[in-house]
Amino acid sequence: MADSIANQEALELKITHPLSEMAVMFFRNHAAVAGLALLIFIVLFTFLGPFIHTTDPFEMVWAPFTRPGEEGFLLGTDYLGRDILSSMMAGGQVSMAIGLAAAVISLVIGVTVGSFAGFYGGAIEEALMRFTEFFQVLPTLLFSMVIVALFGASLLTVTLAIGVVSWTAVARVTRAEFLRIRELEYVAAARAGGAHDGYLIFRVILPNAMPPIVVQANLMVGSAILFEAALSFLGLSDPNTMSWGQVIGSNRPYILDAGFAVAIPGFAIFLTVLAISLIGDGLNDAFNPKLRER
Amino acid sequence: MSQDSLLSLRGLKVHFPLPSRGLFTESGAVHAVDGISIEVKRGTTFGIVGESGSGKSTAALAVMRLVPITAGEVWLGDKNITELKGGDLLAMRRKVQIIFQDPYSSLNPRMRAGQIVREPMDLMKVGDPATRGDRVAELFERVGLRPEQQALFPHQFSGGQRQRIGVARALASQPELVVCDEPVSALDVAIQAQILNLLRQLQDEFNLTYLFISHDLGVVQYVCDEIAVMYLGEVVEQADRISLFTRPLHPYTWTLLSAVPSAKTKGRTRRIHLQGDPPSPIDLPPGCRFAARCPFAEAQCHTARPPLREIGGPGHKVACHLVSETGVAPHQALEGKL
């Protein structure tokens, strides 16, 4: 009897962090777990692969357009006779790095604009949201092409261009969350407890606004990868670096003779974006307490 | 117990402007609190009752300086706190704390219970940082929680326990005045009693002054020394507990009291049902704001606003044209007949 009471007390004091419940929820979602596994596989393939398969992606190693599986080339060779398997690894690193960096840039701009607009309201909100709408109505691909054309096609400008055109969605989500959370009593309680605006924005509201922002940022990585592919396809990317989009772009003229050289990087992009979207979906469900009960 | 005034509201007005519809049309405002004056004596509990939308919670937030004050003044002791800024405002916040209504939304879900109680001490630099941890543990014990529960997150507590955390947080900076904004209306009746008793014990122990906001007359009768009844942003009647509950003068107070559920069946008056809703706080009627729903309203009630007059004993104030100078309320004629 005394034992069971002691047990109960111990049980009651088991500390569950709010995030750990979300993690449990996430791992119950089979599609999300499959997406996560797929993404881990792709990351391992691109970042650890080159240590096993050491062929230089820029070196001509065989006749052009060797079909996949022939002559010992698992994924064949491209129009310059370069090993596509190596290209996939090297290109994946660049594509994912650009996707991640562009998402971080859009996150920083979007969260800053959105949180100030949502927190202060009034004229500040009006000005910031009109500014956001200005960016929203610009045709994104055209705008990023202009940026890249103006400042030259390097990894940095491509990343910045993607970040600068895609932060508006983050800003809107952040603003919406701030509008909701700033009315909650714990914000008033923190203010009554002596919190200044900066503390309220960054320490009280932002941590609670993070879930939908994280989902948005995650999906942003996927769309940034697609964006980079589109720019590369149009020839607007750094010719000295290899990315999936660039492999597609450079093999594009030969699509009828050697479709595989275009299809393989296309499939890699498809898998990566699919994995990221599945994860984003899973995170969304895990963060949304209303769905938890179902 | 000293009887000097700790909190005094002088003609306090809080109006929320409505967004303007056109460039040249004048936009209206919600008259949430429309000129209330009250004095809260040190060490006592002052209750503000009223229905939803009467402005009682807005008045509480104005005292906390959490909403912009349109007009009037708020005095804490001998200090005008209406327009304090920066460091002075922070110093004032140490002395005035608040307990919120909803224990589910008043605690930050991302913070551990201990951090929540500690936060005001850190932000307002109360005491020595090294001893703040001990103080949090002490507060936990004082409000009836176990100190080891500090590491838990809010969602791991029940409603009553959460409200205890809210009480501990309010006491962290050793305030003089605690604004209780419907502190028990979101709780079960059994838990309500526990929290009310805790508040009373803490009041005796720390000589706290409470501004107690509630719509529950039973609760108000239990904890308050003095009570103001609010209707549409105005105080319609104010008295000490005993005279308000035994001899309500304003017809609105009378109908409110008749609506209190009671286990007694003998000797109770019939319940008075008010018709309709209060008028809009945007377009206020020119006369008495209660006139449209008042069963006794006369012509003058619809045209002239009744002033708050002291009638029928010291400190008993009422704003009604129909209460005679000798303190005879309009509903008294009906008493016994119902």
Image (cartoon, coloured by chain):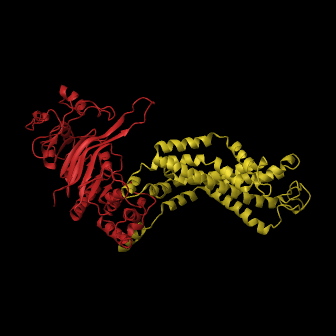
Chain colours: A yellow, B red
Q: Is residue B167 left or right of residue A29?
A: left
Q: Nearer the viewer, residue B181 or A282?
A: B181
Q: Is residue A282 visible?
A: no
If the image is split into quadrants, where does the N terminus of chain B sit? bottom left
* A119 w.r.t. A38: above or below: above
Kindly indicate the quadrant of the structure image that contains residue A238.
Answer: bottom right
Q: Is residue B181 visible?
A: yes
If the image is split into quadrants, where does the C terminus of chain B sit? top left
Q: Is residue A240 left or right of residue B154?
A: right
Task: List x then y, in percent, for residue B200.
Answer: 22, 59
Q: Nearer the viewer, residue B240 or B192?
A: B240
Q: Is residue A231 left or right of residue B261?
A: right
* A294 w.r.t. A70: above or below: above
Task: List x then y, in percent, for residue B217.
Answer: 22, 47
Q: Residue furthest top?
A: B299
Task: List x then y, in percent, for residue A169.
Answer: 59, 46
